[in-house]
Amino acid sequence: MAPSRLRVGFVPEHFSTPIHFAQKHYGLDAELIPFPSGTGHMITALRAGEIDVGIGLTEGWVAGLGKAHEAGDKDGGFRLVGTYVETPLCWAISTGADRPDIRTVDSLQGGKIGVSRIGSGSYVMGYVLADERGWLVPTAADAGAGKELAPPYSDTVVLNTFENLRRAVNSGEADFFMWEHFTSKRYYDKGEILKVGEIYTPWSSWKIVASTHLAQEELVEDLLERLNQGIKHFNENNEEAVKYISTELDYSEEDAREWLKTVRFPERTQGVDPKVVNQTVDTLRTAGVLRLSGGADPSAMIAKQR
């Protein structure tokens, strides 16, 4: 039985501004539940029945469903129902402010990566970075194409929150972490952390998912329509967006204006392009996040195609 009111998980960052507008101006009647630790935490909450819908990172959703498929769980707990952001995401690569041993991306090979959660975007993109840099090699006992890959980092340190990640690279608990550029920039400007590089996702960066049993429900369709209105309002009212981001969220007015130049939301959130999901699965297989010969089924991940 469908709930009377959706519980929607979201990341309380600048990207959430159209969600705020949809609720403030266009009657979005949903319980909005912030997940500052990101997509990996929302996957856990969806599977536990704590939320009905999640708005998060493409790579996190696809990796989560791909891992479930490989384990023989073809349900996975949720399905892709919509596209929230069309543009790629710029992941900043950060270390501690006083880490003379780390000044370039190449110095991170074999180091300790900090992540919010296993399976989160910060975790997945660590492997995409390693693949891009040529750090992924088969294990010594399993050399050859299509075989198991050796971990590119000496340790993966799960730290849950952005605050914990910043603390860890300064204490030495972790050597580096990856987080969205504009969310990180304030802390570069304050001298708390140091940026050593960046990497863009090879895909459109945000998707909307719904619990499997709700993916085709009218409530979800209504949510997507309200988000369309919130996005239209965002596009037509940049000054209101800047004011909200710079007063209610953790960004300067200057950074809010710069971010507006880089982001593009879709006119219609309904549906997901299968080519994007196929590309993401292929990249995650190459990067060793999903098995090269594994059971990840991109077509089964999508409830609504566009």
Image (spheres, grey):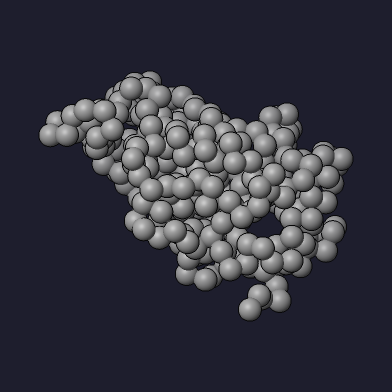
Q: Nearer the viewer, residue 146 or 150?
A: 146
Asked if residue 163 lies left or right of residue 239, the reply is left
Residue 47 seen in the figure? yes
Asked if residue 292 lies left or right of residue 202, the reply is left
Asked if residue 261 lies left or right of residue 175, the reply is right
Q: Residue furthest bottom?
A: 1
- Residue visible at 76% across and 53% down? 227
Q: Quadrant of the N terminus?
A: bottom right
Asked if residue 297 lies left or right of residue 182, the reply is left
Which x, y percent locates residue 170?
36, 38
> Looking at the rendering, which quadrant does residue 22 occupy?
bottom right
Which x, y percent locates residue 2?
66, 75
- Residue visible at 30% across and 26% down? 135
Q: Nearer the viewer, residue 52 or 277?
A: 277
Q: Nearer the viewer, residue 92 or 167?
A: 92
Which x, y percent locates residue 24?
81, 59
Q: Quadrant of the C terminus?
A: top right
Which x, y percent locates residue 209?
60, 55
Residue 22 seen in the figure? no
